[in-house]
Amino acid sequence: MITKEQAMALRHGQELHFGVCKSTTGPRGGVKVTQTRVRVSGMCQTWKTRPEDFRVPVKHGMYDNGEIVPSNAAQFHLMSDCPLAMHTVECIANNDRSAQEVCICHHSR
């Protein structure tokens, strides 16, 4: 979930994730990571008359545009808050070699 404070700290070009990020292992051991990445395409807009409201424009792909507003902010999360990233950190902390080989994470980009 994106809060107003996090939204105000976002910068142009920063990547966020939309929806549920998940990793599935196929029958032959292949790992498929499903995540929808969006980029911030403008500044956070706030209003003095409505202090709880904010609006952050985002871009997905070449032609799709959208925005993060309080009504849909629960569907977005920062790359650092991604459950896949937390799983990878746990694997590294536990020195679990087999889990590290399975973990595929696109957060290093």
Image (tube, rainbow, N blue to C red):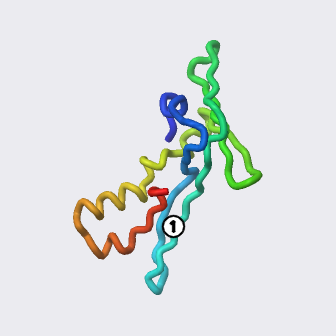
Residue found at the very far bottom of the displayed protein: 28
Q: Nearer the viewer, residue 50 or 95?
A: 95
Q: Nearer the viewer, residue 96 or 12?
A: 12
Residue visible at 60% across and 43% down in the picture: 13
Question: Taking 48 as reference, is 88 above or below it?
Answer: below
* Category of crowding for the residue at label 1, using alpha-carbon neighbours closer than 10 angstroms: few (below 14), some (14–19), many (at least 20): some
Question: Taking 17 as reference, is 35 above or below it?
Answer: below
* Quarter assignment of residue 44: top right
Residue visible at 55% across and 59% down in the picture: 35
* Quarter assignment of residue 89: bottom left
Residue found at the very far left of the displayed protein: 94
Relative to 79, 102 lies left or right: left
Give x and y (percent) for residue 54.
Answer: 61, 27
Residue visible at 54% across and 33% down in the picture: 7
Label 1 is placed on what type of residue? Val
**Circle 1 — which element?**
strand
Question: Taking 98 as reference, is 66 above or below it?
Answer: above
Residue found at the very far top of the displayed protein: 49
Residue visible at 48% across and 61% down in the picture: 106
Give x and y (percent) for residue 29.
Answer: 44, 82
Give x and y (percent) for residue 43.
Answer: 63, 31
* Number of marks: 1
Provide the residue designation for mark 1.
Answer: 33
Relative to 92, 45 lies left or right: right
Give x and y (percent) for residue 19.
Answer: 57, 52
